Image: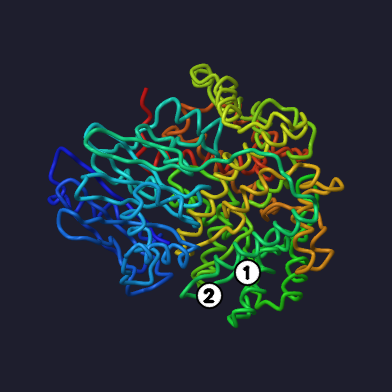
Amino acid sequence: MCGIAGWIDWREDLRHREEAVRQMGATLICRGPDAEGIWLSEHAAFAHRRLIVIDPEGGAQPMIRGERDRAFIIVYNGEMYNMDEVRSELTARGHAMTSRSDTELLLRAYMEWGPDCVDHFNGIFAFGIWSERDQSLFLARDRLGVKPLFFAPQPDRLVFGSELKAILANPYVPAEVALEGLAELFFIGPARTPGHAVFRGIRELRPGHWLLCTRDGVQEKCYWKLESHEHEDDLAVTTDRVQELLYDAVSRQLVSDVPIATLLSGGLDSSAVSAFASKALREAGRGPLHTYSVDFVDADAYFEANSFQTSRDAPWVTRVSEYLGSVHHNIVFDNPEMIQHLLRPLAARDLPGMADIDVSLFLFCQEIKKGATVALSGEAADEVFGGYPWFHREDALTANTFPWSLQLHRRMPIVNKELRAAINPEQYVMRRYEEALQEVPRLTSESAQDARIREISYLSITRFLATLLERKDRMSMAAGLEVRVPFCDHRLVEYVWNVPWSIRNAGGTAKAILRKAVVDVLPDDVVWRKKTPYPSTHNPAYLQAVRGLMNEILADPSSPILPLLDIPGVRAAIDDSFQKSEHKPWFGQIMGVPQMFDYLIQINAWLRDHGVTIVG
């Protein structure tokens, strides 16, 4: 994995802007701590930071193939999982590879097929290719959006980067936020509307899209999207196919020249990935598998079960690790560590995020990095197979909004009345929700229930999953760790997308088809246990700490967030937090009252420390 940045300019000679290009690349050093590189020409300049995973000698970037005015230059962040197939195709067409790197494969694939090259790839990627002959920039992003890519189009200029900070390091891109960005922050966040980047003038290249930039302007195209059709396989055949696709995805994603591990929570998803990884490593003579889990000091003392978190994961981690024979590493954090690093994820995300859940993941990835450079995770299984509560709860299924954000009314009182009036939150969120529903590929023959499940699945895959993938990418790459997500294999996603709910949820059991697909590789009690979300701290000291920090912000007249807040509304929320009440998350499953204070603390720090200007 790596960090990439680039600058296309038809106004000035970029050969004289080396320092600015280096500064853009330097912002991404955490993504690529092992090596750096830049390339300059009159109208195009690239910066690259490298985390070495495959072919240390042959994968240096920016990579150039071709001569002089017919040269092609690439910067690439990602991993290819079908390298052998693509290499065979290109070799048959006369391409002579000079390295083992997937970087060269992507570059030569573009030289051979142009924009259609992306149709040949199975992997996670974000890359830019400059053609000297055509004087054009080609940008592309993987189908599910596992790897990030942002760009800032301006007249006669385009700047791009893996992260927002790389673009904001360019002298022509100011850190400005307008009304729409504030609407995203306060009423959509920590999610984002696909394609939006909060900062004015910066956009996200959407998953499954490519972009072509020339003197004539910028062209974007969707090259992949979910398609709906009748599912003809019965339960047995579907089970076998899911097992086959998942095992193949996990096996492919074990390719690495550096130590590799899995993240293991003891839940179904991470256990399935770990089981198949262990099996594939044994068959390849590469075992044993190393597994990593995260927990908190005094977790037993403070944990209280609720409808979202029914049990602790820790005992199940031990159960799975012992069953698989993995070398297990249990990472434990205490509350002071969480508070100490409260704002560290903000520097990685460039935007406020998922509070303590981000902090624990960042610290977790830092510890994993000490023993591995690559890890596999169970992310995306709930979106793909329908595991979240909102697939099963009547209030979510019948709600006319995003099902992970049913508590919009809880956000309203904390934002000042003038800003609320200017944004009209209900209308803004409804517009974004309706836009998403308009994208859903319908199947006219299915029942009303299946049609609604298809909508919830689409929202989860294209909106909620994007938030989790962003979190996973930023927190892991901030620690120099590459995390892969087998459940995001597009072949698996395409297949399960059309599996009817009666099969996916067979017998009324959430993710039944996935459970049936892993009965041969996991203990029955693990296969059939109820889902619990990513672990977060239940220690009341966390609430006390963020409540105290929130009070400090309110008491400081220089706090930049104050003009955006309804101070009495925030104080009322602080007072209410002293009362024990039912867990009602305002986002996702576990972001409750403490996380709301944390989120506001992050917005304040973001405005104060990241040079953000609010514009009309």
Residue placed most toward the observer, 502 or 114: 114
Secondary structure state at the residue bearing disc 1 = strand
Location of residue 37 by image quarter = bottom left
Task: Pick the quarter of the image with the N terminus.
Answer: bottom left
Q: Amino acid at mark 1?
A: Tyr
Q: Are the residues flagged by discs 2 and 1 in contact, CB closer than 8 Å?
A: yes
Q: Is residue 40 at least partly visible in the picture?
A: yes
Secondary structure state at the residue bearing disc 2 = loop
Q: Amino acid at mark 2?
A: Gly
Write the residue at 61% across / 33% down: 441
Q: Which mark is residue 371?
A: 2
Q: Is residue 328 above or below residue 424?
A: below
Q: Which mark is residue 390?
A: none
Residue receiving disc 1: 292
From the viewer's perspective, tell me whether residue 278 is left or right of residue 108.
right
Task: Pick the quarter of the image with the C terminus.
Answer: top left
Residue 370 position in % (x across, y down): 51, 73
Residue 442 position in % (x across, y down): 64, 31
Residue 142 position in % (x across, y down): 47, 50
